[in-house]
Amino acid sequence: MQPLEGFARRKKTSLWFVGSLLVVSVVILTVGLAATTRTENVTVGGYYPGIILGFGSFLGIIGIHLVENRRQMLVAAVVFISFGVVAAFCCAIVDGVFAARHIEPRPLTTGRCQFYSSGVGYLYDVYQTEVTCHSWNSKCQLKVRSNTCYCCDLYTCESAEPSPTYYEFVGVRSCQDVVHLYRLLWASAVLNVLGLFLGIVTAAVLGAFKDMVPLSQLALGPSAPPQILYSPAQQVLAYAGFCQPPTTIPTCSSYPLPLQVGPASPSGDTQPPTQPASSSGPPPQAPPRYAPASFPPGEKPPPYAP
């Protein structure tokens, strides 16, 4: 959760990075297409990262402005940008190595290459003529077709193996197009390296921004009602159904009390009260009950002992 000012600042920063990556992707695509359509026999793949990075940047711009599905859209943008970063790394190496090892610009810039333009069409596939190329101590015939820039200085007559350096470029309008191709290859390699680093930074920025939620959105959003996992009353009632009712303690009135006491002993001690008889009658060993004592006339009863 971020304050509204911090969220707006991070959103603006993310837009700057994504917009810059989109611009670089468009430039990579344009330069790559211009290089790959310059000749027929030189294949350039530097425009593929521009397509992938551009699509990822487009998804990132849409995801930044979304509210509901922003996280899913930004995750998809980060995935495409990651693939574009890998493609930019590979294409930068391929285009750089090709420009450094397979194209020699010195004969082209000094005007030692010739251009053959005779032919019936731009994409004429049949060789039209043979030209003579002179090597150090020999000469040989080289077949060329229409709209071809060829360099005899780069063609070795004595060697049966193909030359590692391109000595002819088919489908060009002039030898100056080959010079433009050489510069476009290096420009594509540099732009792919720039897209590589910018894509890494942009993916990191979008990955941090996708989990941010402004505090105002949480405050204005509908609050979910609290969920009661259990009701204490229902729990007490449920437990009460398993408890046994408490047993009733008998009161004192349910036990019979002795109504008579025996005569006091000569020592002054009283006899203990007798146990109450059960409802089924006295047991066989129970002592007999006391009978009321009779006193002769004129004699007082003994004092009552409590």
Image (tube, helix red, strand yellow):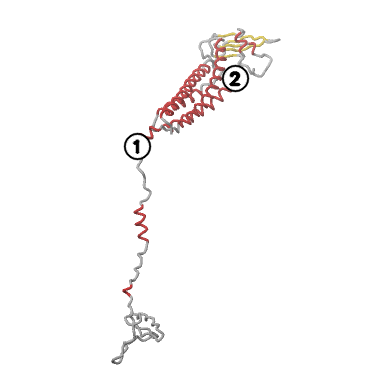
Q: Nearer the viewer, mark 1 or mark 2?
A: 1
The tag earlier along the polypeptide, 1 or 2, is 2
Q: In the rendered structure, which amino acid carries the disc numbered 2?
A: Phe
Q: Where is residue 297? Give x, y as percent.
A: 28, 92
Nearest to the observer: residue 7 or residue 70:
7
Query: Which amino acid type is marked by label 1?
Result: Pro
Q: Position of residue 127 (x, y in %)?
A: 57, 13
Mark 1–mark 2 distance (CA, rounded to whole Å): 60 Å
Outermost residue to the left: 297
Quarter assignment of residue 11? top left
Relative to 86, is 238 above or below? below
Question: Which residue matches tag 1?
Answer: 222
Q: Which residue: 35% across, 59% down?
A: 240
User: Would you say 99 lies left or right of 56 here?
Assistant: right
Q: Which residue is mark 2?
A: 98
Vertical order, 279 against 6 (above or below): below
Along the line of sight, the residue nearer the viewer: 59 or 128 = 59
Q: Secondary structure at mark 1?
A: loop
Residue reaching furthest bottom?
Answer: 296
Residue 134: x and y in percent read 66, 9
Name the quadrant of the C terminus: bottom left
Q: Relative to 223, does residue 300 appear above or below in the rendering?
A: below
What is the secondary structure assignment of the residue under circle 2?
Answer: helix
Residues at circles 1 and 2 in contact by the CB criterion of under 8 Å: no
Observer-nearest residue: 188 or 116? 188
Q: State the residue lying farthest toward the right.
A: 137
For the image, the number of numbered tags is 2
